[in-house]
Amino acid sequence: MRFSWISFLMQTNMRTVRTLFFVCILTLVSIAANPPADNSAVNPVIQTALQPSPLQDNLRRLTDEIGGRIPGTRAMQHAVQWGMQAFTAAGADMVHSESFEIPYSWSEGATEMTATTAHQVSSMGVGGGTVLSSFRVRAVSVAWAPALDPVKHVPMVDVGEGTDADFQKAGDISGKIALVHTTVLKTWADLFAEYANAPPTITRAAKAKVKAVAFMATREHDILYRHTNSGAGEIDRLPMVIVAREDGERIARLLASGSLVWADLAIPNQIGPPVKSSNVIAELRGSEKPDEFVILGAHLDSWELGTGALDNGCNAALVVDALRAIKASGMPLRRTIRFILFSAEEQGLLGSRAYATSHRTELDKAAGVVIYDSGTGKTTGFSVGGRKDVLLIARALMAPLVQFDVKDVKPDMEWGTDHFDFMLEGVPTFVADQEEANYLENYHAVSDTLDKVDFSQLKKHVAEAAALTVELANLPEKIGPRLTHDQIEQTMRDTNSVEMMKADGIWDDWVSGKRGRQK
Ligand SMILES: [Zn+2]
């Protein structure tokens, strides 16, 4: 998953002027230390990356053979083995895994939902009256939501889009099942809204003491999907299902026409104690500054209704193939490159957070973190985690990528993928910005399968990722310093990211020192 925070125009005040001055100085110092790279130097890496490779077969094995990969399952263990073997075959100098704990294991049982409605029939002769009719509602549990023992004949109520006003209008709905309307997912902004709206809606539903929440799917044509709305792998507050959009709209129309609708609902989720999951790490060692390192990463885990091909199997396979291309090109490396397949990204960035935290003491030596997590839509550029001080050099590093139309460098602070905890540790980060392509319609869905992957585009992304990573590894000095706690916080303010961090519940952890760079 991933999306970017919306940036608003900065208000000019003295603090901003001071900050801009500070940024200018940092940039000038940085440029002096880092003259523009010899861009042609990475051409052999790009050329090697574009040659035939095991990319497609690697991804086929990960998706078709292993399938969806939820941390704590056998499939995830197999995926970790896949990563270790693939890195070894690609020519890594070293491969290992590092385990961490996630708070709960979770799996869905046989979720069942049936809707029943009463309607009047009249006959030309005698009789007529109220009859009941039922239909099956295609539904799946929201991930990391609690189980619900089977309930029967529970009244359903339409709570619109789940705003405060909607819940007030609905009145006393305790014990009922709340149907929440959604918008069809078409743009990154829609995805942002979906993630932003769910938690406050759930809070209101919990306050209203509803029995369960039924979200209308944000995809049409009966496509079901799942993800979690809990931020750090905790079990959410209420039983929740996602219902096929067509079924949800039908229920909404029945209720709007004055009919009563009841649901039978069973959500037998299995929730277990803490489980271990593993990140997979491979290295190509640098020769001049082997202790300094660049990370190229993507998450290996996925939701399991589909096989996690676009999110994020394709980019896990990209990371492996980038290692192969760099090694095969024979390009000398000044710094070490770590290629990391993170786990439990989907449960709240848990794998990358565990890595950033456990490697905190060596992050002064981190020379950049590059992350891909948006399927195979064309890369348009990179977001640099709010770091205005690295903008100019980052733009210079784009020169070899212009042949692929990659040129935008945005100072946005992004949320929602594995660079996040490195960004909070002050390390320069680079998240690939990509076109939506077919990512959103298949997002976390039954339809996220290998046939959706655009392999010719993915090959170009391997070349881009390998080139950018090598450029970062070979700059005379690191592209930028590790920021201090106060500098990171100033970056949050400069990019108007504080409100969003508050909404996501991250701000308190940042302020208390539970998350991110220590003071
Ligand atoms: Zn993802």
Image (tube, rainbow, N blue to C red):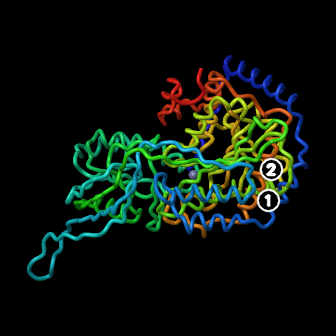
Q: Would residue 288 appear left or right of 447 to someone viewing this image?
A: right
Residue plotted at (74% across, 36% down): 367
Q: Is mark 1 within 8 Å of ligand 1?
A: no
- The residue identified by callout 2 is 467
In this rendered view, identify the residue nearer to me: 435 or 284. Answer: 284
Dot 2 beta carbon under 8 Å from ligand 1: no
Q: Are marks 2 and 1 in contact (CB under 8 Å)?
A: yes
The disc label shown at residue 411, or none: none
**Residue 212, position in %: x, y?**
30, 50
Q: Is mark 2 on a helix, strand or loop?
A: helix
Tell which residue pokes out farthest to the left in this image. 126
Q: What residue is rendered at 61% in x and 25% in y?
A: 489
Residue 38 x %, y %: 91, 43
Look at the image and tell me whether residue 257 can be seen. yes
Crowd around label 1: few <14 · some 14–19 · many ≥20 (10 Å)? many
Q: Distance between the residues labelled 2 and 1?
A: 9 Å
**Which residue sits at x=83%, y=25%?**
29
Crowdedness of circle 2 by 10 Å Cα count: few (<14), some, many (20+)?
A: many
- Residue 255: quadrant of the picture: bottom left
* Residue assigned mark 1: 49
Which label's residue is closer to the chain start, 2 or 1? 1
Q: Where the C terminus falls, by quadrant?
A: top right
- Asked if residue 301 lies left or right of residue 464, the reply is left
Query: In the rendering, at what x and y percent does residue 414 appear?
Result: 61, 40
- Residue situated in front as seen by the camera: 409 or 232: 232
Which amino acid is tagged 1?
Answer: Ala
Residue 189 in sight in this render = no
